[in-house]
Amino acid sequence: MYFDDLKLDDMKEPEIINGQDFRLMFNVATNWLEKSVSDIDALNVYPVPDGDCGTNMLLTTRSSLEEASEADEKRVSSVVQAMAKGALMGARGNSGVILSQIWRGLASSLGEKVTINGEDLAKALLQASEMAYRGLSNPVEGTILTVIREAALAADEKAASGNGNVTSVLEAAVKAAKESVANTPNLLPVLKEAGVVDAGGQGLYTLLEGALLYLKGETNRINLEKSEVITSRIPVALKQWPDTRADEEPFGYCTEFILKGENLHPDKIRQELEKRGQSVIVVGDETTVKVHIHAPDPSNVIHYALSIGTMHKINIRNMDEQYEDFLALQREKAAPAVNVAVVAVVTGQGLIKVFTSLGASVIIPGGQTMNPSTEDILRAVEAAPSEQVIILPNNKNIVLTAQQVESLSSKKAKVVPTETIPQGVAALMAFDPKADFETSVKQMNREKSTVKTIEISRAVRSTKLNGFGIKENQVIGFMDSELLSVADKASDLITDICAKIDFDGAEIITIYYGKETETAEAEKVGEIIRRHYPMLEVEVINGGQPHYNYIVSVE
């Protein structure tokens, strides 16, 4: 919670706001969003764990607030710029990346402003919308993009009327955002069929609504209510997924702090800290620098920092106790340098072994419902044993996040946009560590498209999709993200999907069975496929992945 410096209901609707107001406004918005995270997470088109949009937006927003905590609150511009930086570094999932672009647009528009009025806010929302659209190569309507655009247009119209203070302008944006979210199923047929609204749009509406509560002096509602989740005709059931985390060997300490002083040089500080540890991130200016480092001995880091400034908000954690900061990178500390390193996002002990055996230098634990942040991926790239790094996200909801790292890393980094585990395996099998960087990227991009991916899970709620009436807990099967079959048993479903596939040119079927699937059942499924398709080689591998009973590769 972020109520430590907030007096509830003690302010009148303002004509203008300063930096402190802006930060407190989004402290309240973050708490308002947090109350609805599980509802927003449940707004998946597919009734499977799908990256948890609400969770990603909450974690991204928290990161922005942490960065803003040290900003100059006398100036709105300082607070917004800090929030934009924090959102970028903490962005998780597609929704988090888009949200970080929205913050970047706000920061760009507000420039050096000390305070802002309604007209300033409206212009900033318009710039935020433009930045969000510009950040995607293929923007789709009926998503968070539509919601920010329509909210911004409504705010601009209110400001242009000459009768809009900062509160009434935001109120117009919130009203338009709500209407826009409700309309998303009419813009995206897949939303309409599934009976849900766009989750990212719902999250943005909730954030804006929370900010408005602060401006209207209604923050007491947070203790009594939560935001209305705009639903369609199909009732949405909340889902809760077990935490699945692999045990990792300990490696030093994750050390974070704010360094204050005069004539600080972030680049020089970064170079010095790289001699003392790994995964070094240094951002800031001549007076304030934020530092993150993984070091075997944090005392060396602290002694250096104290020699050039004063340390604040020091946080030192043993990484054996702080899995979220990851690193499976510890196993790579003594790894020899390679020409090109591969960083892969994978969850499940069996799948981790597969990717490691095929040549992945660094594994980032993550996938469905556990999306790594921009900073997580950046740390992995910076710690990889090469100055040239290829990133395999292996999940459609991680691709955008991974692509942010290309411009942030000090290394030459490139994303091969693998959206599934089989695509990642195919790309990695094409990887030649002796080939030059560009050749490897081309080969891996080409090979990732040669496989078909079948994913088998269980429905977490009843819904209708692609013409199928799905009951809660039924087995559902996708091929390359398209729902193809629904059944009561996994074996029946896999054979049904295989019957719909053209196997001309196919040679191998690899079945990765999940954490909740018995080995005997998986072997039985393998035998069924062998009987039906004797011309194919069928492999059954314990992937250990959560949430998906089977991930099947056809190549």
Image: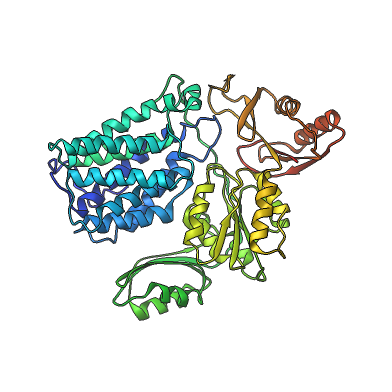
The answer to whether residue 230 is seen in the rendering is no
Q: Does 313 sit left or right of 487 as displayed?
A: left
Foreground of the two, 361 or 418: 418
Q: Does 291 sit left or right of 343 as displayed?
A: left
Relative to 79, is 309 above or below? below
Identity of the residue drawn at 32% across and 30% down: 178
Identity of the residue drawn at 58% across and 23% down: 466
Q: Quadrant of residue 329?
A: bottom right
From the top left corner, tell me how far across and down residue 281 is, in percent.
45, 66
Identity of the residue drawn at 45% across and 26% down: 196
From the top left corner, tell me how far across and down residue 313 is, in percent.
34, 64
Foreground of the two, 81 or 357: 81
From the top left corner, tell me how far across and down residue 518 is, in percent.
72, 36
From the top left corner, tell me how far across and down residue 168 is, in percent.
18, 36
Foreground of the two, 104 or 209: 104
- Which residue is most to the bottom? 307
